Image (cartoon, grey):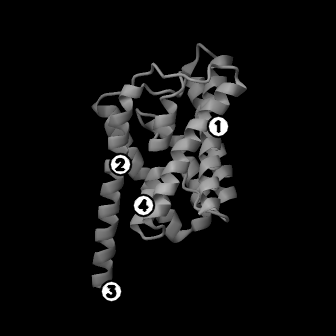
């Protein structure tokens, strides 16, 4: 249990450091070119995710996302105490990752984002993005588990560009990004809508996959 907590904590901290640091670096180098900043942010996040997941998978869960942990729990791959342990590690790790980035770049440690992200389109984007992410992980895990790190890295990189919400799809990431007033920030008032969309998509995904599994069992 302690090993899994440490991997989830430090892994999520690394992820948020990559996301926040690359966003801030992009605006520092090209303050008048948000498209270039988003491009750098998406590529660096995808690269960091690939390295992170492929490195940790042989030793631990490599979830780094409460939504992924919820699906694992629904499949009885982890028990309820482990689920809450993952939640704790992921949320704490995400916040620490943001603080580490602030320290590296000489920014105020404690911040709140002023970037409002709201509206039906953005919430629908998070709902669909979360479904897509879970679908990719689910099917890659069944057919070619060794391809999961690359598949997740690529869909997140693409998601930055084809979704209006820039594909947060992670409650821990969402909360932590409200604590940075950099390029990747999200206003604290926008958090609830994002998390409701993400969790709703996860519940739907769990119900649909369970229903399909039952039908397959009956059919066989």
Residue 99 lies in quadrant = top right
Pick whichever, 77 or 34, lies toward us.
77
Which mark is first along the chain, 3 or 2? Answer: 2
Residue 157 lies in quadrant = top right
Where does the image place residue 70, in percent across and percent down from the top left? 42, 58
Q: Which residue is at a point 60% across and 27% down the rendered structure image? A: 23
Where the N terminus falls, by quadrant? bottom right
- How many angstroms separate mark 1 from mark 4 (CA)? 25 Å
Q: Secondary structure at mark 3?
A: loop
Circle 1 residue: 18
Query: What crowding class fits label 1: few (fewer than 14 Cα within 10 Å), some (14-19), or many (20 or more)?
Result: many
Q: Secondary structure at mark 1?
A: helix
Q: Are marks 2 and 3 in contact (CB under 8 Å)?
A: no
Circle 4 residue: 71
In the displayed orientation, state which residue is furthest to the top.
Answer: 32
Q: Is residue 43 visible?
A: no
Q: Is residue 107 visible?
A: yes
Q: Secondary structure at mark 4?
A: helix
Pick whichever, 218 or 75, lies toward us.
75
- How many angstroms separate mark 4 from mark 2 (CA)? 11 Å
Q: Are marks 2 and 1 in contact (CB under 8 Å)?
A: no
In the displayed orientation, state which residue is furthest to the bottom.
Answer: 220
Where the C terminus falls, by quadrant? bottom left
Which mark is first along the chain, 3 or 1? Answer: 1
Circle 3 residue: 220
Circle 2 residue: 199
Q: State whether residue 135 is above or below residue 189.
A: below
Q: Which residue is at a point 34% across and 35% down the rendered structure image? A: 192
């Amino acid at each position: 249990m302690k090993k899994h907590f440490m991997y989830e904590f430090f892994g999520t901290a690394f992820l948020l450091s990559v996301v926040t640091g690359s966003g801030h670096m992009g605006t520092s180098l090209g303050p008048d070119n948000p498209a270039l900043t988003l491009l750098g942010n998406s590529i660096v996040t995808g690269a960091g995710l690939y390295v992170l997941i492929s490195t940790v998978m042989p030793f631990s869960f490599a979830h780094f996302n409460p939504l992924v942990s919820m699906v694992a729990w629904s499949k009885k791959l982890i028990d309820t105490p482990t689920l809450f342990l993952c939640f704790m590690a992921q949320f704490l790790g995400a916040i620490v990752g943001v603080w580490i980035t602030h320290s590296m770049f000489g920014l105020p440690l404690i911040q709140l984002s002023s970037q409002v992200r709201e509206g039906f389109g953005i919430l629908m984007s998070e709902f669909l993005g979360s479904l897509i992410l879970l679908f990719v992980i689910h099917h890659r895990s069944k057919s070619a588990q060794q391809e999961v790190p690359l598949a997740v890295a690529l869909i997140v990189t693409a998601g930055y560009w084809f979704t209006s919400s820039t594909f947060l799809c992670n409650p821990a990431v969402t909360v932590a990004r409200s604590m940075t007033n950099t390029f990747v920030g999200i206003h604290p008032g926008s958090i609830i809508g994002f998390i409701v969309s993400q969790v709703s998509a996860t519940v739907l995904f769990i119900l649909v996959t369970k229903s399909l599994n039952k039908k397959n069992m009956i059919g066989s």
